[in-house]
Amino acid sequence: RIKEEEALELVDSFSEGSWIVDCLEGNIKCSDKWAKRIGLDQVPEEERLRYTHTLVHPDNPATNSIEHCRENGLTRFDLEYRIKTVDRGYIWTQNRGKIVYNAMGKAVKVYATTIDITERKRATEKLQKSEERFRALASASTNVIYCMSPDWKEMHNLQGKSFIRDTEESSGTWVETYILPEDQPMVNEVINEAIRTKTKFEMLHRVLRVDGSFGWTFSRAIPLLDEGGEI
């Protein structure tokens, strides 16, 4: 039977850290790598569990905690919160694990792994700010702004600015909604070429206006490519 100390080091090979809490004894066992990173290796064993509670960022909601999970009888948890480290200050962590209860429903053990998700959080925050700036630009602009799926089969969003009808939810019938029937083959041909070459779409064409008449517009769409060069 594998010992808890061996299990911690084994799990540590594919996570930032791993730890086990003995709820009855009131102590915590932590993998060496994670213990050093959060300074736990410098704390007397009898003080370690209390010390780990001081590492959680003070702004962390009480409902986003293992204690809350225990109080509500949850057996599994997946929590994201900030932890104070020795080398980098506060970092965002994802903590996943299992809570074991005895026959009386009292928590006896907590098994968990921790990974550093700080960069993921920063990327998400950066993306959110970028989207907020885009929405602000779209609201202030007199241009019609739209967003398409990579294959152009769906229009995700369009702000028509009272020139053409708005699309607030993804639509697979956008061609019929906005493009005159006799112009659809020509528009689709230019779109397909832009998809094939992964270049911007540019075209002067007619559109159906809000009042049912047709108007002229110059459309431009720039593809965003992933790391693999795909739209």
Image (cartoon, rainbow, N blue to C red):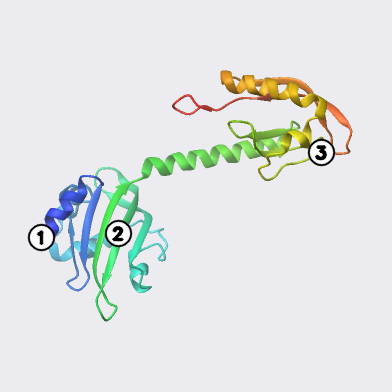
Q: Residue at x 78, y 23 (%)?
A: 205
User: Does the rendering let one see residue 34?
Assistant: no
Q: Quadrant of residue 63?
A: bottom left
Q: Residue 36 — which label?
A: none
Question: Helix, strand, or loop for circle 1?
Answer: loop
In the image, 22 versus 192, the foreground residue is 192
Q: Is residue 151 left or right of residue 79?
A: right
Question: Helix, strand, or loop for circle 2?
Answer: strand
- Name the kind of residue labelled 2 in the image: Gly
- Counting from the top left corner in percent of width and height, residue 123 is at 44, 39
Residue neighbourhood size for the residue with mark 3, other residues' Cα within 10 Å, grouped as few (<14), some (14–19), many (≥20): few
Is tag 3's residue or tag 2's residue first in the polypeptide sequence? 2
* Vertical comparison of 165 with 152: above or below: below
- Name the kind of residue labelled 1 in the image: Arg
Position of the N terminus, as image quadrant, is bottom left
- Name the kind of residue labelled 3 in the image: Ser
**Discs 3/2, front:** 2
Residue neighbourhood size for the residue with mark 2, other residues' Cα within 10 Å, grouped as few (<14), some (14–19), many (≥20): some
Q: Is residue 52 left or right of residue 121?
A: left
Question: Helix, strand, or loop for circle 3?
Answer: loop
Q: Are marks 1 and 2 in contact (CB under 8 Å)?
A: no
Label 1 and label 2: CA atoms lie apart by 20 Å
Position of the C terminus, as image quadrant, is top right
User: Which residue lies under the disc numbered 3?
Assistant: 162
Q: Residue at x 17, y 64 (%)?
A: 47
**Discs 1/3, front:** 1
**Discs 1/2, front:** 1
Q: Residue 97 — which label?
A: 2
* Vertical comparison of 192 with 33: above or below: above
User: Which residue lies under the disc numbered 1?
Assistant: 1
Residue neighbourhood size for the residue with mark 1, other residues' Cα within 10 Å, grouped as few (<14), some (14–19), many (≥20): few
Q: Residue at x 66, y 43 (%)?
A: 170
